[in-house]
Image (cartoon, rainbow, N blue to C red):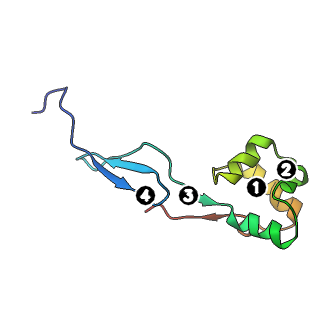
Amino acid sequence: MLSPTHRSPRVILEVPTSAVLTFDTQQRLTREEVPDLISYAKLWRLLDKRRLSPRDIVWMAGISESTYQKLVKNDSVRLDVLQRICEALNVDIGDVCSFRTRL
């Protein structure tokens, strides 16, 4: 039996998005940083194709500066934000973002 102070050895797995996930010996996953699972590269290409500045989406969709910064960093945003962006650009959600598989 293990003492309460005994710590299981950990294995560190490097994820291409520079996030670190650790697995303990019981195969439980603990996140030290959430990996990037969403990409807004399609949004930036669409804006470029339409000759719009990336900042134009702020006033077109009525989003805040902090939400814009989340988009730039590929952080997740609320679904209603994506809906407003899609409505402003008259496109479907698949035209502005894509989801990556975890591992």
Mark 4 nearby-residue class (10 Å; few <14, some 14–19, many ≥20):
few
Residue at 70% in and 53% down: 72
Provide the residue designation for mark 4.
15
Disc 1 to disc 2, C-alpha distance = 12 Å
Precedes in sequence: disc 1 or disc 3: 3
Amino acid at dot 2:
Val
Precedes in sequence: disc 1 or disc 2: 2
Disc 4 to disc 1, C-alpha distance = 26 Å
Label 4 or label 1, whichever lies nearer to me, is 4
Disc 1 to disc 2: CB gap under 8 Å: no
Secondary structure under the numbered disc 4 in the rendered image? loop
* Residue that lies at the very extreme toward the left in this rendered image: 1
Left/right of residue 89 with respect to residue 92 in the rendered view = right
In the rendered view, tell whether residue 87 sits above or below residue 23: below
Disc 4 to disc 1: CB gap under 8 Å: no
Quadrant where the image shows the C terminus? bottom left
